[in-house]
Structures are given as C-alpha cells and as structure tokens.
C-alpha cells in the first residue's frame, strides 16, 4: 500500500514539501452532477430563476473556487493557477459540471478541479433552492490528470 504523504512518521498531519519537485505542466479534470426536478430545470434553462442566470453564476463560482482551494482544504498548497474552465451541461434530469484546471508547478491541481465542480454544484443548489429543495448533488470525482511524477491517469 502507498504511504500517505500528508502524515509524518508519527502519524501527525503535515503539508508535503514539494520544493524539490520540478515545475511542470499539470492539468486535472473533474466532474459531478446535480439532479433537478424538470420544472426547475426548465426555469434554469429559460433564465427564469429569480436570483439570476444560474449557469453563468455557477461557472464564475467554480472558477473562483479553484483559485481559493488552499483556503478551503487545509493541507493543499496555494498554487499559481494558469487556467480554469468550468462547463455546465443541462441534461434531461439535471446539470453536469466539468472543470479543468491547469498549472505549471511542482504539484498537481486535482483538488482545485474537484473544488471547482463542488462549488459550482452548490451554487446551482443555492440559486434554485427556493424552487426545489430536493435537488441531489453527487458523483463528484476526478476524471483525468496529467503531468507530474505519477504521469497521466484517466477514470475508468
């Protein structure tokens, strides 16, 4: 089994020292979805939600979240984010969010991509909760990563 890098030899939490790692291009893509009642989904699609353009606000929230991940996840490194895209796809029973984050640094951006997806989904919930409190957020996961010592990885 692989040793957990965020624990020292005594089992105490630590921030991993990445100063010896070379700066290389690293990218990660994450995804997730929110199930929404058909009438509420139609209101989102038609721009009829009282709080405003749900899709646009969720996209901006996801981008902002990627840039602030180190403020939210205690052992994440603050990273120079080179790019973030957050795509939202309205489907028959909900919205799928996909975020891709890139950097040139000594550590990866998997957490930034998953944070972007999570916050975008929470933003959708927040903006539409007056219409449907039963929305279900789920399936947030890493879809792919590239770069770094461990190389490329894709979800099955």
Image (cartoon, grey):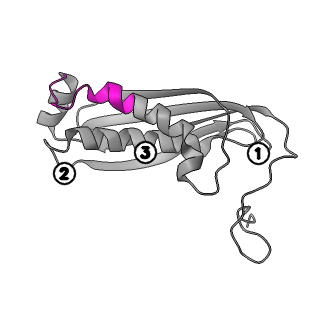
Q: What element does badge 2 sit on? A: loop
Image location of residue 23, percent across then percent down: 81, 34
Q: Quadrant of residue 17?
A: bottom right
The residue lying at 56 percent from left, 54 percent from top is 73
The residue lying at 49 percent from left, 39 percent from top is 65
Q: Are marks 3 and 2 in contact (CB under 8 Å)?
A: no
Q: Is residue 31 visible?
A: no
Q: Residues within 10 Å of mark 3 (few under 14, many from 20)?
A: many
Whether 109 is drawn above or below 47: the answer is below
State the extent of the magenta-drawn residues as a range.
Answer: 47-59
Residue, disc 2: 134
Whether 136 is drawn above or below 91: the answer is below
Q: Earlier in the sequence, mark 2 or mark 1?
A: 2
What separation in Å lies between label 3 and label 2 (alpha carbons)?
17 Å
Residue, disc 1: 150
Q: Residues within 10 Å of mark 2 (few under 14, many from 20)?
A: few
* Mark number, residue 118: 3
Q: Residue furthest bottom?
A: 10
The residue lying at 75 percent from left, 56 percent from top is 16
């Amino acid at each position: 089994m692989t040793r957990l890098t965020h624990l020292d030899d005594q089992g105490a939490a630590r921030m991993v020292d990445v100063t010896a790692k070379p700066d290389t291009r690293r990218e990660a893509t994450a995804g997730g979805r929110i199930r929404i009642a058909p009438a509420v989904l139609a209101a989102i699609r038609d721009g009829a939600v009282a709080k405003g353009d749900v899709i646009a606000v969720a996209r901006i929230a996801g981008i902002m979240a990627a840039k602030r991940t180190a403020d939210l996840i205690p052992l994440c490194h603050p990273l120079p984010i080179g790019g973030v895209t957050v795509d939202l796809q309205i489907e028959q029973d909900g919205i799928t969010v996909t975020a891709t984050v890139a950097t040139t640094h000594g550590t990866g951006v998997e957490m930034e991509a998953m944070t972007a997806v999570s916050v975008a989904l929470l933003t959708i919930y927040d903006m539409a909760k007056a219409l449907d409190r039963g929305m279900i957020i789920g399936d947030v996961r890493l879809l792919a990563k590239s770069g770094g010592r461990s190389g490329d990885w894709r979800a099955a």
